[in-house]
Image (cartoon, helix red, strand yellow):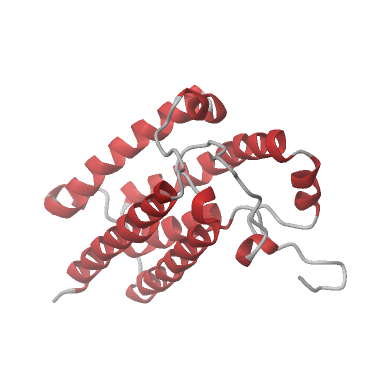
Amino acid sequence: MNAEFSFRLIFWIHLILIMIFNRILPALRAKKSGAKLSPDYEAIENEGKFLFAFRVIAGLLLAVVIVIYTFFPIYNIWFQFYLPSGLRWVGVIVSSISLFFWSYSQEVLDKNWSVNLKIQEEHTLVTSGPYRVMRHPIYTAMIIWSTGLALYTANMFFVGFTALVILWTPLRISKEETMLIGYFGDEYKKYMEYTGRYLPKFKRDGRL
């Protein structure tokens, strides 16, 4: 088994794990609790039509890129670039750890999680687990995972994907926090004071 095949295999393992633990299982858990997961008018308005359309189009383009990367390697020659093998394996480790953190963060949200921006029935403000010190650990995990992906694939397709994730994330978070402030009011504003957006917020004495 050559190194390039190993990285492609890891890529597919990651995709399967994401589909199972970061999409299917959280969706089933939320659905069981009565959450609405379809992108209705309210969800689209919360996210903004531009960002919603961007997310849908980017998802379709990503699917095309995945097919090309996996089944038509001859076309990847134009987009591959050299990285030392050791750095690529660092990318594997980083992205793998971030996947576990991503999945754990979604599990803590439980029924409050949705792929769309929508307040669920009996929506609660989760402040346990990673949410005790940071407001958006899932987005943090997504950025770290995509960065690791760009490293271990050493492919400009996924460098571009990482750039899109980094540019899209603050826009999405801004919409999400506006929605949450509108629902929770001062409770969420107070929560923002002692938590970081992407990373844990430390107190002045250096403690979490």
Residue toward you, 114 or 30 = 30
Asked whether, in this view, residue 127 is left or right of residue 18, the answer is right
Residue drawn at 44 percent across, 60 percent down: 145
Quarter of the image where the N terminus is located: bottom left
Can you see residue 3? yes
| Image quadrant in which you'd find residue 196 | bottom right
Asked whether, in this view, residue 197 is left or right of residue 14, the answer is right
Residue drawn at 44 percent across, 38 percent down: 36
Can you see residue 82? no
Quarter of the image where the C terminus is located: bottom right
Instruction: Establish if 92 lies above or below 143.
Output: below
Residue toward you, 103 or 1 = 103
**Picture mark count:** 0
Q: Position of residue 134 (x, y in %)?
A: 67, 58
Q: Position of residue 35 (x, y in %)?
A: 46, 42
Q: Position of residue 164 (x, y in %)?
A: 45, 42
Residue toward you, 117 or 155 = 117
Residue drawn at 72 percent across, 41 percent down: 184
Residue drawn at 29 percent across, 37 percent down: 61
Q: Position of residue 178 (x, y in %)?
A: 67, 34
Residue toward you, 174 or 67 = 174
**Which residue sits furthest right?**
204
